Amino acid sequence: MEWVLSLATDLVNNSVDVKLDRWDLKPGNDVDAYMEQMVTEPDIKKVIMICDHLYAEKADGRKGGVGTETQIITPNIYEKEDQSKFVAVLTERDGDGKPCLPAYCRGRLFIDMSDPELYPSSFAELLHWIFDVPPHAKPALGTKPSFLRDSEEAPSLEPSAKADPILGVDIKDSPTPKSIQSALGASKSEPLSSLDPEETSTEDEEKRIARAKELQRTTAPDAQIAREIYSIEFVWIPPGSFTMGSNDGRSDEKPTHRVTISKGFWMGKYAVTRGEWQSVMGGNLSHRNSPMGHISWEDCQAFIKKLNRRVRWKCRLPTEAEWEYACRAGSSTPYGFGYSHSRLSLHAGHSSYIWRHNAWGLYDMHGNVSEWCSDRYREYTNASVTDPKGAVTGSSRVLRGGAWCSNPEHCRSASRARATPADSPINFGFRLCCSSDE
């Protein structure tokens, strides 16, 4: 029962309104009526069956409360066309490795949570099912090849003047478009406000990102854009200005306003991993390259305090403005990599370094784990600010980036979240930074 309570708590922490007999049943309530209501009530959108060997035996033998529950569930599964309301969550396998499922669940897809080491990915799969968000986005239907269109001539096998002489494809599809090549030669004295774009074309976006890379290279101390501190990898984030927030987003992202980051700083290349956490805080953790989760803001402070006793550079959490500035890396699109969310890190517990980095070399700024910032939550104004630190008072701290269990819109560069400093659900993590003059 404790495992079920823990799962239910994790679901509630991820915006799932859970109905559980331990929480909802009161003395004098009719147990059978409650179970039937959970299955047949239209407002109950999803029903989870927690399955181990005892549950399977009682369900198949129609014994006790589980047997009554089975008699209620099976007609709803077999007689209704929509079967997406029910899913079995497996918590145990037998000695031969076979899943302990009741007969009516065999042959149906289930969510396997029998391995504690794989709980994060299994929990993510469960959330995808609950929110009806496919774990793998189907790409948009492309255009029929021109040689299949009756109205067009067959394509020439000879490369055109615009085509790459080896690949035979238009140069605009090359990994290094001409617009990027030319932008790399932009004047180094170009004002920092060029990172705060007004244009919206793809070519201008490419130029802005190229300028951001050049700015990183030319302002990095000792011409080094990367360094290690206590075996934690950092990259250089240059000073500059940008437009913070989004007028197309949620209300707490408005109004957009000009922010200046007056000094460059170092930021963790990845979210702090389980291995890095163990090297500072101790313990015996598996999956050492995966991001550390279940972390509160207070846990971050304890980690930073202990780390700073061992290093010359004083580490800290980024401010909210520093985080969004670093995430955008010169971009103005909803995500640091463009408009589409198809490249989000929406898989739980993966190694931190396998997803593509942004223009400044930061990995997994969208998805993976929600990352704590140092700030107290503040409402935006349209006033221009320099190095904002958040509200002076308040009980909530800011998180950014969304997580593997988030809707894509909550993973955008401008998207904001907040929680109390003691909150530590499975999808909360953090990324370090330190200032150049520390």
Image (cartoon, rainbow, N blue to C red):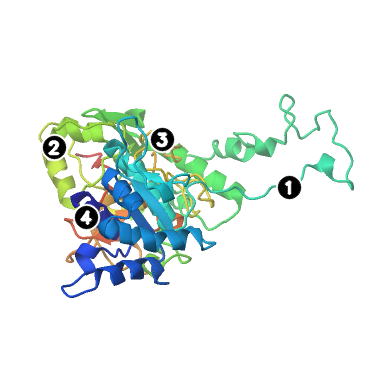
Looking at marks 4 and 2 on the same chain, the residue that comes earlier in the sequence is marked by 4
Q: Which of these two is toward me, 258 or 339?
A: 339
Numbered mark located on residue 5 in the image: 4
Question: Which residue is label 1 attached to?
Answer: 143
Residue 308, numbered circle: 2
Earlier along the polypeptide chain: callout 3 or callout 4? 4
Marks 1 and 4 close (CB-CB < 8 Å): no
Q: CA distance from mark 1 to mark 3?
A: 42 Å
Q: Quadrant of residue 229?
A: top left
Q: Is residue 128 above or below residue 381?
A: above
Mark 1 or mark 4, which is nearer to you?
4
Image coords of residue 98 (percent x, y): 37, 35
Is disc 4 surrounded by few (<14), some (14 to 19) or many (20+) residues within 10 Å?
A: few
Can residue 404 be spotted in the picture? Answer: no
Q: CA distance from mark 3 to mark 4?
A: 53 Å
Disc 1 to disc 4, C-alpha distance:
49 Å
Tell me which numbered mark, 2 or 1, is placed earlier along the sequence. 1
Position above or below: 228 against 40 = above
Q: Tag 3, which secondary structure?
A: helix
The nearer-to-camera label among 3 and 4 is: 4
Name the residue type under label 4: Leu
Q: Which residue is mark 3?
A: 218
Are there few (<14), some (14-19), or many (20+) residues within 10 Å of tag 1?
few
Q: Is residue 346 visible?
A: yes
